[in-house]
Image (cartoon, helix red, strand yellow):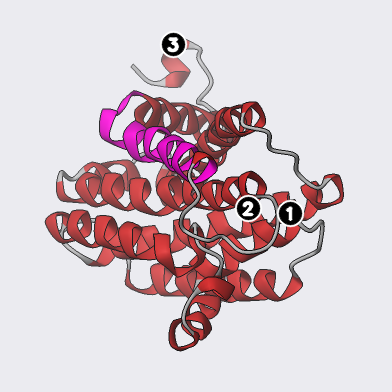
């Protein structure tokens, strides 16, 4: 029966978006593989870096530098790796095509994913921050606001990159490439400061969103600075990846 027949008004756009955001969030938090990448592996990385003496993380208290890097890893894990894989398989199974043609629409689907990524990242930062505090982490208070801006820009850039990958490559390829990129990015500025990399690699890492995100969080949370240069890099990547996604994203195989 129609809404007019039953007397029920159709759901407003914001209600549909919130419902999709709740669904996407529950999917991430209930999916074992995504939970492993989003929380378990970053937590293990935090414990390993915080308690060990290697690798050399450069200037600053080791736990402070390590925590900033692990926060960057959490953002990459959820916004890029997890969303790329989930969206890639949704596309292969026809879920994206169905939802895109539903009242939710393509805009609502994307808003739901963005909101879910934001909520899960908040959960990650709270959990990882609690573990870090137990290990002795003391962030620079002056850097909390710039760190928040860095996380938002980083999440936006990596979500755009994840959707670009998911919308242009077959699901099996997305799975392989997303996991490979996750491993490679660990050493390209995410966990290891770009200043600790060889000169031939450091310049490349600083131009990548991984280096900009990791260095930006370290500058904010360790030194209390405003990482304006890193913000510019992240904004450029977000704009470029967003435009490419809008141009080449395919809603079905």
Does the stretch in magenta take in 38? yes
What residue is shown with label 2? 65
CA distance for labels 3 and 2 = 59 Å
Q: Residue 150 vs residue 54: left or right?
A: right
Q: Which range of residues does the magenta coloring cover?
A: 30-50
For label 2, count other residues whose C-alpha is less than 10 Å away and answer few (under 14), some (14-19) or many (20+).
Answer: many
Please say whether residue 250 is visible from this viewpoint: no
Q: Quadrant of residue 30?
A: top left
The C terminus: image quadrant:
bottom left
What residue is shown with label 1? 222
**241 above or below 59?**
below
Q: List x then y, in percent, for residue 184.
A: 33, 65
What residue is shown with label 3? 6
Q: List x then y, in percent, for residue 247.
A: 38, 74
Judged by depth in the image, the label closer to the viewer, 3 or 2, is: 2
Q: Nearer the viewer, residue 138 or 157?
A: 138
Looking at the image, the residue that sits furthest to the right is 142
């Amino acid at each position: 029966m129609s809404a007019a027949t039953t007397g029920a008004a159709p759901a407003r756009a914001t209600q549909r978006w919130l419902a999709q955001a709740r669904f996407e969030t529950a999917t991430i938090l209930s999916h074992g593989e995504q939970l492993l990448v989003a929380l378990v592996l970053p937590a293990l990385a935090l414990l390993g870096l915080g308690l060990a003496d290697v690798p050399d993380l450069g200037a600053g208290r080791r736990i402070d530098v390590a925590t900033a890097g692990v926060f960057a890893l959490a953002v990459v894990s959820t916004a890029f790796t997890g969303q790329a894989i989930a969206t890639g398989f949704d596309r292969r199974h026809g879920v994206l095509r169905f939802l895109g043609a539903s009242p939710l629409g393509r805009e609502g689907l994307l808003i739901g994913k963005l909101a879910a990524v934001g909520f899960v990242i908040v959960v990650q930062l709270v959990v990882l921050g609690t573990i870090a505090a137990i290990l002795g982490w003391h962030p620079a208070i002056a850097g909390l606001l710039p760190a928040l801006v860095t996380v938002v820009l980083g999440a936006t850039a990596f979500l755009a990159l994840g959707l670009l990958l998911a919308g242009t490559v077959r699901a099996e390829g997305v799975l392989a490439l997303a996991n490979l990129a996750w491993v490679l990015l660990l050493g390209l500025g995410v966990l290891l400061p770009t200043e600790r990399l060889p000169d031939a690699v450091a310049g490349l890492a600083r131009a990548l969103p991984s280096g900009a995100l990791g260095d930006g969080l370290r500058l904010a949370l360790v030194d209390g600075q405003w990482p304006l240069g890193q913000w510019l890099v992240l904004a450029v990547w977000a704009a470029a990846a967003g435009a490419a996604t809008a141009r080449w994203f395919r809603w079905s195989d």
